[in-house]
Image (cartoon, rainbow, N blue to C red):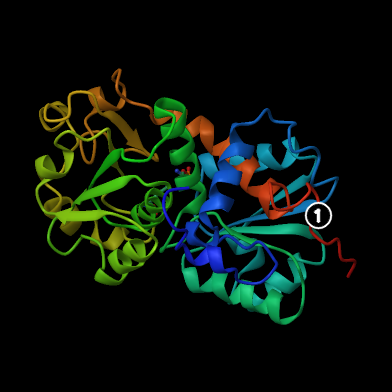
Amino acid sequence: MNGPDRSPGASGRGTTRHVLDVDDLSCADLRAVLDLAAAPPDAAGPVLDGRGVALVFERPSARTRNASEMAVVALGGHPIAIRGDEVGIDRRETAEDVARTLACYHAVICARVADHGTLTRMRAALDAAGVAVPVVNLLSDRAHPCQAVADLLTLRQRFGDLAGRTLAYVGDANNVWRSLALACAMVGVRLRTAAPDGYGPDPDDVALVTEAGGDVEVSTVPAEAVAGADAVYTDVWVSMGEEDEAEQRRRAFMGFTVDRDLLAVAPDALVMHCLPAHRGEEIAADVLEGPRSVVWQQAANRMHAMRGLLAWTMGAGPDGAAGAADRVDR
Ligand code: CP
Ligand code: NVA
């Protein structure tokens, strides 16, 4: 941990270990999750012990779904992947009723949702009912904490201690940016962000990250952000749900491609991308596949990060014996 732990997770938000964004964890929790993720797959033991984990997807996924299913199996659990239209959140029944129902069968409810508010409502419904089943965000329009944990794991594997390192983020200050920025703040990584006017971070989010102890610089000039950085990160210019804005966004982001010319000002920097990638838009093909790219390591780490995160939701880690979360029959 670096300095005082000012992450909101540090003050606690109840006993159920929900993860809607990285700041639901304290710095110590985040370190525990990373340690669990880095440990051999059987280190936490079969903490799910035959119990179910719901994996709801309102949006497509390659990495998150497969990483999550395999992580659940590694922890001795039974994953059930559910397409959004099967449960029809707020169409067939309310988000609250879906959460209460899934909690009858599953130890954890993980969901990828179009609207972050769906997750907060699911969490509130379970907490209000006294149902100790964690809700885990598999990506929303606001946050992607499971990705950020995998990204930190990747950086830790490459650099060891991360305090004092500098990450440059070039592109849209979106869901991936927000979780990554919080994660960086919590491990002492400086974050320099370059985005076109209108696509940079919301001032409230910069305040949130600063409050979590983060050192955030924002500019509209990619080379300023990238100069001398230890790693350069980018994500798609058009996120899921923004397809109607695609042309406008592609115009706005011209000049923000992570390519060889841009990387010349950071000769030692690693290159990161959460995937899926659009070669020739946010990242040049030769950079994505080049020797500085760690994107496939990030992708592989999604499974380890998920295993660490799920084990932590079940009580594994320094603050609780593995499997300590209450088993409630309903
Ligand atoms: N990075 C990521 O979340 O990939 P998927 O959308 O394929 O899950
Ligand atoms: N920002 C992207 C991330 C995909 C993993 C999206 O939300 O579509």
Percent of width and height locating residue 157: 47, 28
Q: Residue at x 20, y 54 (%)?
A: 217
Q: Residue at x 66, y 61 (%)?
A: 17
Q: Residue furthest front?
A: 3
Residue bearing the label numbered 1: 324
- Horizontally, residue 238 falls left or right of residue 33, namely left
Kindly tell me whether residue 93 is visible in this rendering.
Answer: no
Q: Residue furthest top?
A: 291
Above or below, 77 against 201 in this view is: above
- Horizontally, residue 8 falls left or right of residue 247, namely right
Hey, what amino acid is under mark 1? Answer: Ala
Q: Give the quarter of the image for residue 87.
A: bottom right
Above or below, 284 against 50 in this view is: above
- Horizontally, residue 20 falls left or right of residue 254, namely right
Percent of width and height locating residue 73: 74, 38
Q: Give the quarter of the image for residue 168.
A: top left
Q: Residue furthest bottom?
A: 128
Query: What is the total number of numbered labels drawn onto the structure image?
Result: 1
Q: Secondary structure at mark 1?
A: loop
Label 1: few (<14), some or many (≥20) within 10 Å?
A: some
- Label 1 beta carbon within 8 A of ligand 1: no
Above or below, 167 against 56 in this view is: above
Q: Residue at x 87, y 66 (%)?
A: 328
Residue 282 or 125: which is nearer the viewer?
125
Kindly tell me whether residue 153 is visible in this rendering.
Answer: yes
Percent of width and height locating residue 305: 57, 40
- Horizontally, residue 98 falls left or right of residue 137, namely right
Percent of width and height locating residue 330: 88, 70
